[in-house]
Image (spheres, rainbow, N blue to C red):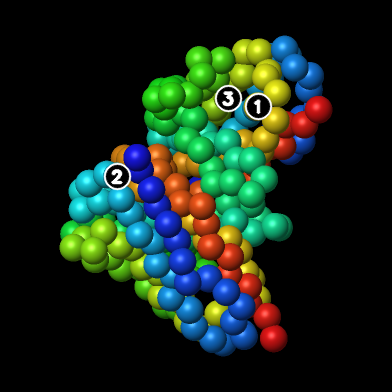
Amino acid sequence: EVQLVESGGGLVQPGGSLRLSCAASGFTFSTYWMTWVRRTPGKGLEWVATIKPDEGEKYYVDSVRGRFTISRDNAKNSLYLQMSSLRAEDTAVYYCAGDKSGSMIYWGQGTLVTVSS
Amino acid sequence: DIQMTQSPSTLSASVGDRVTITCRASQSISVWLAWYQQKPGKAPNLLIYKASDLESGVPSRFSGSGSGTEFTLTISSLQPDDFATYYCQQFDRYPRTFGQGTKVEI
């Protein structure tokens, strides 16, 4: 059974940092492109970042480029999102997803990030 | 960036209805479009990929069509389990973008 389990969300002050993790099982993680998607109340679903299996390519939405870093550890079947300089508008449920040729086939249950003072 | 526009934003329907949701891209994306269903408190679920390919395990009452800039998701006979929000997403180029969502309600 495929499982993606996110962790690391929580309440953080504006300007703060947070590291999200996603533990994968039930599929060959090292061969999949992986993606972070977030859901905000006002904007619906928003693609955040995608990483190639060998970390050779990484892509970001403009609003997080330079503040967020996507990475992975294939030996640990894990995906990460390091978030810094957090803003109120980064408040969202963050999902990790396994990418099948551009469409997201596997999804975690999400982790809530709240940026507030 | 490619803008994805869904219509309608909200759709009121009854069990057994045929439902159609439209997604328009601001420029051609060939067939590089996916459709997802999301229920409250749950992760999105892939329904359709490459505009018209049904994901494994998805009921056959769901179908997708279109290419270029205009796409549709059709539910042939709405079931109680189908009341949810539906999103289109283009994967022709980065940044990948989603439509704003269509809520299907009673």
Residue type pointed to by label 3: Leu
| Disc on the earlier residue, 3 or 1 | 3
For marks 3 and 1, give the CA distance.
16 Å
The label nearer to you, 2 versus 1, is: 2
Horizontal side of residue A30 vs B45, given as left or right: left
User: Which residue carries the number 1 mark?
Assistant: B81
Q: Is residue B57 in view?
A: yes
Q: Residue at x 58, y 36 (%)?
A: B37
Would residue B101 appear left or right of B98 to someone viewing this image?
right
- Residue B82 in the image: x percent, y percent? 65, 27
Q: Residues within 10 Å of mark 3 (few under 14, many from 20)?
A: many
Q: Are marks 2 and 3 on the same chain?
A: no
Contact, CB < 8 Å: mark 3 with mark 1? Answer: no
Amino acid type for the residue under numbered disc 2: Gly
Badge 3 sits on which subunit?
Answer: B
Where, quadrant-wise, is the C terminus of chain A in this rendering?
bottom right
Compared to residue A43, the image places residue B7 above or below, namely above
Which residue is denoted by mark 3 in the rendering? B73
Compare residues B29 and B7 and report the one nearer the observer. Answer: B7
Q: Nearer the viewer, mark 2 or mark 3?
A: 2
Residue to which mark 2 is pinned: A26
Task: Name the chain under label 2.
Answer: A
Residue at screen point 78% across, 22% down: B13
Question: Is A37 in front, or is B91?
Answer: A37
CA separation, marks 2 and 1?
Answer: 26 Å
